[in-house]
Amino acid sequence: MSHPLKVIGILRSCFHEKFGTPRQPHLVPGATATLTVRAAYLPEHSLAGLERFSHVWLLSYFHLNTNKKFLPKVHPPRLKGETIGLFASRSPHRPSPVGLSLARLVKVSGDTLHLSGIDLVNGTPILDVKPYIPESDCLPEASAGWTAHAPFPMLQVAFTEESLAQIAAAEERLGIHGIEGLLADILRQDLRNPRDKAQSKDGLELGFFLHDFEARFVVREGTVTVVRLLTGTTMHKNERRLPQRRVGLAE
């Protein structure tokens, strides 16, 4: 029996590809996004009262997934190559590619939610929004499972003089502040895949797209250095950027 899921809106995020997007919400508090609720869902009524909450749950569809078959074991990056059962993880590669993210609700403006602390890429279909209710959603005595013993790897972050000048130019161009801190929060988590020996090699220059630029960086001996910001470049790694057909989603 088929039950198509409805898309209530498409997320507009500062992240433009999976590489560089945080692996969990709130790792990068300055990561921002907006969600405009489609007119069909009467946002002038359906959003009434939501502005009184500080955080919301976002249920999303992992539209950039590339997996073609079910795998019962996955390799979370923080386990450094070890495996864990799929359902003991938050891997996006699931039988039903549905994501769950907790975001800070900055404000509600008409039909649009302004969000921060997000971990979702630009263009993500959003299936639902629910208010975060501390008395129901927070359990201080809950066990953190294997994650309690596998903290995220942390790097020191540095910037070249060239990159700092380009950050200042980007802030003026975009009319925003805090790009240096945003980049630091993103990069200290170590974006590299620990199972990819070539990518993990010290001294390799890598990059990811954020806002309207590509941030280029190098990791050496536990320090990640932002070397430059490039504008006008093209996203070229097709395997990261071509979405699969949205099976079962009703527009």
Image: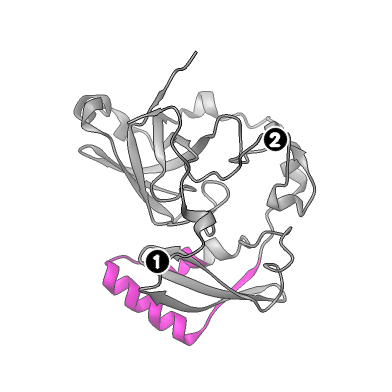
Res 155 visible: yes
Q: Which mark is residue 10?
A: none
Q: Position of residue 199 (x, y in %)?
A: 67, 67
Residue at (64% x, 76% y) in the render: 204
Amino acid at circle 1: Gly
Residue occupied by mark 2: 86
- Mark 1, residue position: 178
Q: Nearer the viewer, residue 132 or 83?
A: 83
Q: Check disc 2 and report its element: helix, strand or loop.
A: helix
Q: Above or below — where is 104 with respect to 199?
A: above
Q: Which residues are magenta?
A: 155-183
Q: Quick check: 225 above or below 198? A: below
Identify which residue is drawn at 54% across, 34% down: 97
Give the residue drawn at x 70%, y 72%.
222
Q: Which picture quadrant has residue 190?
A: bottom right
Q: Nearer the viewer, residue 20 or 95?
A: 95
Q: Amino acid at mark 2?
A: Leu
Mark 1 lies on a secondary structure that is: loop
The answer to whether 238 appears left or right of 202 in the picture is left
Q: At 51% from the left edge and 25% from the top edge, which residue is drawn? A: 135
- Residue 54: x and y, percent? 39, 38
Instruction: For the C terminus, give its image quadrant.
Output: top left
Q: Residues within 10 Å of mark 2 (few under 14, many from 20)?
A: some
Work out whether mark 2 precedes mark 1 in sequence or the reverse, and give the earlier one.
2
Mark 1 neighbour density, 10 Å: few (under 14) some (14–19) many (20 or more): few
